Image (cartoon, rainbow, N blue to C red):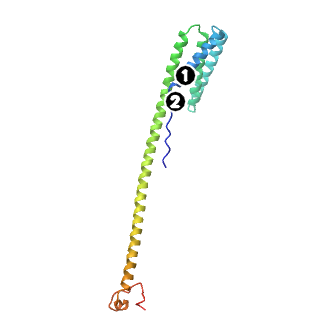
Amino acid sequence: MNEPLVARHWLAHAAPKVAPVVATSTVLILGRIWNANGAEHSVGNAALMIVLAAGSATAGAFASAGRSGDGIVAGTAFATSGSLALAGVAGYADGWSLPVLLWAVATAVAYGIAARHWRTDRRDTLAYERGTAVRAAEHGHVERVEALRAGAQIESARAGAAYAEQLATALITRATLPGFNARALTHAGLPELPAHTEHDQ
C-alpha cells in the first residue's frame, strides 16, 4: 500500500537552519536587556552565572563520561552552559564588542554541532528511503508473479470450461443426427460413450 505523500512547508525546512542563530541571538538580547537593568559590573550576578555555567558544564561532563553516557543529556547540559556564559558576559560587559564576539563564536559552534546532526539525519533518511525502495521492488516482483500465476489459472479454467461446453455441444449434436446408434458404435469396437441419450434406450 502506497504511503501518502505530505509536502512540507518551506518554514519546516528553514526552521532547523535558523534555529542556532535564533537561539544565540535570543540569549545575547536577553543578556543586554539584563545589562541595561543593572547587571553591568555586578560581581554577584557575574558570580552566579559563572557558578551556573560551571555546574552545567560539569553535569555535561558527567553525562558524557563512561560507556553508558547519554549524548542528548550531555549536549543539552553543554548548550545550557554556553548559553549561561554568553548571557553572563552580555550582562556584565559594558560594551558590545565582547558580547558580539562571544555571540559569533557561540553561533559558529552551534552550527558546527548542528551540521553534524544534519548529516546523520540525512544519512539515516537516505538509508530508510533506499530500504523502502528495495522492499517495494521485492513486493512488486512478488505481486507480479502472483498476478501472472492467477491469470494463468483463470485462463486454464476458462479453457477447461470452453472445452467442456464444446464437448457437450458435440455430444448433443451427434445424438440428434439421423440414424445415430450408440450401441452399433460399441459393437464395432469403439469405446463406450459416457453419455446415454434417448436413442440408446
Give the camera-side residue of 119 and 66. 119
Residue occupying image coordinates x 40% and y 75%: 165
Say which amino acid is labelled 1: Val
Question: Which residue is label 2 attached to?
Answer: 11
Q: Dot 2 lies on which element?
A: helix
Q: Position of residue 61 (x, y in %)?
A: 58, 24
Give the camera-side residue of 59 and 83. 83
Q: CA distance from mark 2 to mark 1?
A: 14 Å
Give the mark toward the camera: 2 or 1.
2
Q: Position of residue 53 (x, y in %)?
A: 61, 18
Q: Dot 1 lies on which element?
A: helix
Vertical arrangement, residue 135 with respect to residue 14, above or below: below
Question: Which residue is label 1 attached to?
Answer: 22
Vertical arrangement, residue 27 with respect to residue 199, above or below: above
Residue occupying image coordinates x 36% and y 80%: 170
Q: Position of residue 82 (x, y in %)?
A: 57, 19
The total number of labels drawn is 2
Give the camera-side residue of 95 and 9. 9
- Quarter where residue 79 is shown: top right
Say which amino acid is labelled 2: Leu
